[in-house]
Image: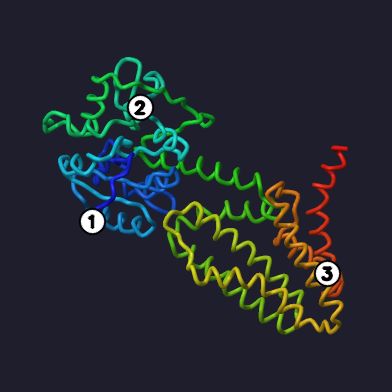
Amino acid sequence: MAHLQQPQILAILFVEAGVSADCPVGPFSTFGPCTLLDQQLSVLVASGIQDVALLSDFVAPMIEETMLHWRERGLHIAAFSDRSALAEWTKKSASLLILGHNVLATPATIAHAAGQERPILFVRDAATSDDRHERIDLNDRWTGIAVLPSAYLNNLPQLAEDWSLQSALLRHAVQNGVPRETMAIGPSATLQSEIIVDAGDIERWQGRTVQQHFDQENTTATPFRRWISLPLARTMMPLLWDSRAEAAQIVAWGRYALMVIVFILALLQWPIAALGLLIPVLLLEEVSRQNSALSVRVTDDALLAKVYSGAWFALPAVALMSSGVTSQLNAFLIGGTAALSVAVSAAARPMSEKWVIARDEAVVLTLGCAIAGLSLTSAGLLTSFAVLICGFWRPIWSRLNAI
């Protein structure tokens, strides 16, 4: 096993490779576009955790494959089937972030737990919990999340055959009077976690995660994205996940192929057709982007992604050269105004992106002008000026109101 630098806090994830009648969901059960274990690890990474130890009854080949994938993404991860080996490896870590079997929490919850400077048990009110949460006493049940000193692993007595290490750590923490923090229940709770035991739990957690993700996207989305491309992407997510990686690859490669066709149409001096085909390119791009954001195992080809991004900058130049614009003044006006509008748009977007005409809106507006009968020169100038106005009017209006 490769040596890993010991961190100050290390996450220990309990993994039971098998399933049972009481808990038909295991670490490799399908969770949207990935597995439950992938989802757990992605939350840890999103929370800033860089070092993870998996403790399982045996290190199955699928665990090895999962670790290889996450090591390639920069996560320090190791797997153990022996408690003594795990205890030896964690000696130099100040604290352990414990996550029980099938425990799934939000990144904010994990970050809050990892930031604790003292040992702590996260609990739920026994009256509003069920048997999936291990009972501590009459009032509390354990959420499966705790921050404990690493010395606890070495101080545990010899376990009976029917005792799990997870339960033993909990009992040891309770006997030592580790403080408890009660987690609220419900979608509005700041800290959220669940122990996944069946397909219904997966569906509810997945739906809540997607809802929160797209709500966050909508807060800064420009009009085209908020009203058209984001709703389409949200509708497409279940279809992509049901087909695993095949549909996602089709979407990713489809936008590359369409962009090539757009270039060909621009060179053939068919601007309306080229602009019209850019609309499905924008939609496929949004679907691919959101799928990558929600799918921990979906990655875009780095070289193709760079070429694709560069194509957006080269496309106006190709259209300009092939459109028959012979006047240097017209070329200067289009190029200069477009460049200025892009700069203004980029500067204004952090302030209030919903009031900015971005690339997507510029494509739609230019297409509309071209369909209305305006020349490419006039359409380009009109779009550039619209971008400038939307970029400037809000700060100007704010200054006027301050007078």
Vertical relation: 170 (above or below) 5: above
- State the separation of the CA atoms marked 1 and 2: 30 Å
Residue marked by disc 1: 2
Q: Which quarter of the picture shows residue 331?
A: bottom right
Q: Nearer the viewer, mark 2 or mark 3?
A: 2
Vertical relation: 297 (above or below) 135: below
Q: Which quarter of the picture shows residue 403?
A: top right
- State the separation of the CA atoms marked 2 and 3: 63 Å
Question: Disc 2 marks which amino acid?
Answer: Arg
Q: Report the residue at 47% width, 37% height from top.
A: 108
**Earlier residue among tags 1 and 2:** 1
- State the separation of the CA atoms marked 1 and 3: 60 Å
Q: Residue 104: x percent and y percent?
A: 39, 39
Q: Nearer the viewer, mark 1 or mark 3?
A: 1
Tell me if label 2 and label 3 are in contact, CB under 8 Å. no
| Figure coloring | rainbow
Q: Nearer the viewer, residue 43 or 342?
A: 342
Circle number at residue 118 = 2
Q: Is residue 331 left or right of residue 189?
A: right
Crowd tier of the residue under label 3, counting other residues whose Cα lies within 10 Å: few below 14, some 14–19, many 20 or above: many
Question: Disc 3 marks which amino acid?
Answer: Ala
Question: Disc 1 marks which amino acid?
Answer: Ala
Q: Residue 167: x percent and y percent?
A: 23, 29
Circle number at residue 379 = 3
Q: Residue 79: x percent and y percent?
A: 24, 49
Q: Is residue 139 left or right of residue 249?
A: left
Q: Report the residue at 46% width, 55% height from top.
A: 241
**Earlier residue among tags 1 and 3:** 1
Crowd tier of the residue under label 1, counting other residues whose Cα lies within 10 Å: few below 14, some 14–19, many 20 or above: few
